[in-house]
Image (tube, rainbow, N blue to C red):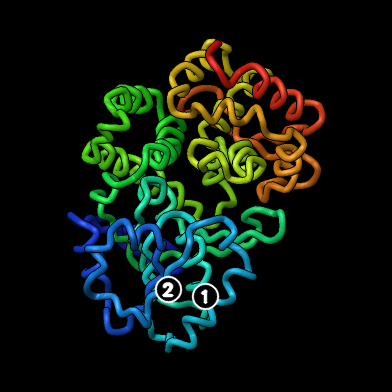
């Protein structure tokens, strides 16, 4: 068990052998209300056969469309009409979308409700389940509204990873790759060695669980030192300025973690053009990460460029007229820079998409 320090309240991350065990371990089950990803409820129906009261369980489709005030209003009303009170506990079961929804609801209902999360995707287990963030969309603006409100407990059952699709695994690995790459070169190459043993028919949950823990080891000091993302924690956004833009411009046809891989490659490509890192480093990274973004690199070529540029301009990390980007001087050497959209970003993105997303 690990403890994450927070200005709001410290919280624990606990490991369980199965989803059923995690479900049974929630605090005060007599006061618990559940927000559950409907796909998870179907995929793991046996685990949900006992302990969850139907009248206190709300199934939610895990889609970006659900992260809006219009979609969340019925959820708020359902919780209140079913008897949720100030001393209730909200338990969220699902991946990143459910986490955003559950965290936001818990942070604003009664000005702060106890909540716990059982993350069921690799991406959520390795990255987003710690860090306290919620993000909600408004109109065409992605993740512009949100709160910092940590869960009271994180309950992880890595056994659920065996049921994920290969794209779900690769999406989670995208964030794991990011964390290892921004940490140091030794860990990054160790990860690449392990990843070569993974295949769609042999995802090896035990091996992946090792990297879930290693990823938390890297992320924890950043979020404890800079909980509200005003300084050093910005480094964790490596790959995300471009990745979020690719994700939204493709109408979420590119999974988040895979979009982050493409975003890291774009950031490194831009870093070469700005003389921050060698072209040989970029070429090595391009070859190493190719299996972890294709065929979505080719999908990216079909996306309307103006949608990408518009999404980048709307990125919440920007200040003034410049675009804030996390660039690289090599593994473990990331830095934040303001980059001119017209002079640097648009030409770099255009060249990257046209020529750099394949190995040919």
Classify 203 as above or below 40.
above
Circle number at residue 352: none
Q: Answer with the quarter of the image where residue 271 lies.
A: top right
- Say which quadrant the C terminus sits in: top right
Residue 94, how many percent across, how many down?
A: 39, 59
Q: Nearer the viewer, residue 67 or 317?
A: 67
Classify 333 as above or below 168.
above
Q: Answer with the quarter of the image where residue 86 lies.
A: bottom left
Q: Answer with the quarter of the image where residue 120 lies.
A: bottom left
Classify 104 as above or below 332.
below
* SS label for mark 1: helix
Classify 287 as above or below 309.
above
Dots 2 and 1: beta carbons under 8 Å?
A: yes
- Horizontally, residue 106 falls left or right of residue 274, namely left
Residue 43, how many percent across, how many down?
A: 31, 56
Residue 224 showing in the rendered view: no
Mark 2: few, some, or many residues within 10 Å (few <14, many ≥20)?
some
Q: Which residue is mark 1?
A: 75
Determine the residue positioned at 52% across, 43% down: 256
Determine the residue positioned at 48% across, 61% down: 61
Residue 42, how many percent across, how many down?
A: 33, 60
First of labels 2, 1 by sequence position: 2
Determine the residue positioned at 53% across, 56% down: 63
Residue 244 showing in the rendered view: yes
Circle number at residue 58: 2
* SS label for mark 2: strand
């Amino acid at each position: 068990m690990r403890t994450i320090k927070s200005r709001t309240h410290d919280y624990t991350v606990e490991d369980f052998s199965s989803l059923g065990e995690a479900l049974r371990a929630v605090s005060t089950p007599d006061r618990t209300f559940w927000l559950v990803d409907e796909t998870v409820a179907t995929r793991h129906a046996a685990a949900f056969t006992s302990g969850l009261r139907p009248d206190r369980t709300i199934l939610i489709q895990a889609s970006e469309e659900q992260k809006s005030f219009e979609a969340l209003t019925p959820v708020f009303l359902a919780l209140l009409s079913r008897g949720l009170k100030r001393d209730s506990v909200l338990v969220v079961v699902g991946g990143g979308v459910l986490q955003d929804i559950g965290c936001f609801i818990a942070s604003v209902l009664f000005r702060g409700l106890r909540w716990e999360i059982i993350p069921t995707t690799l991406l959520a287990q390795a990255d987003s389940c710690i860090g306290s963030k919620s993000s909600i969309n408004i109109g065409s603006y992605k993740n512009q509204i949100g709160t910092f409100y940590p869960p009271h407990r994180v309950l992880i059952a890595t056994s659920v990873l065996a049921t994920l699709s290969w794209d779900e695994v690769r999406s989670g690995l995208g964030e794991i790759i990011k964390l290892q790459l921004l940490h140091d070169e030794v860990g990054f190459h160790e990860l690449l060695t392990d990843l070569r043993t993974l295949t769609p028919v042999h995802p090896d949950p035990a091996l992946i669980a090792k990297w879930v823990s290693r990823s938390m080891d890297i992320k924890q000091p950043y979020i404890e030192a800079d909980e509200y993302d005003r300084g050093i924690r910005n480094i964790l956004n490596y790959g995300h300025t471009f990745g979020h833009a690719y994700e939204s411009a493709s109408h979420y046809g590119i999974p988040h973690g895979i979009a982050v891989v493409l975003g890291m490659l774009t950031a490194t490509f831009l870093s070469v053009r700005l003389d921050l890192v060698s072209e040989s480093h970029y070429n090595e990274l391009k070859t190493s990460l190719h299996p972890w973004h294709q065929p979505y690199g080719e999908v990216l070529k079909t996306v309307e460029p103006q949608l990408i540029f518009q999404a980048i301009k709307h990125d919440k990390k920007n200040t003034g007229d410049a675009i804030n980007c996390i660039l690289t001087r090599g593994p473990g050497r990331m830095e934040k820079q303001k980059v001119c959209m017209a002079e640097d970003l648009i030409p770099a993105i255009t060249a990257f998409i046209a020529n750099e997303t394949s190995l040919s």
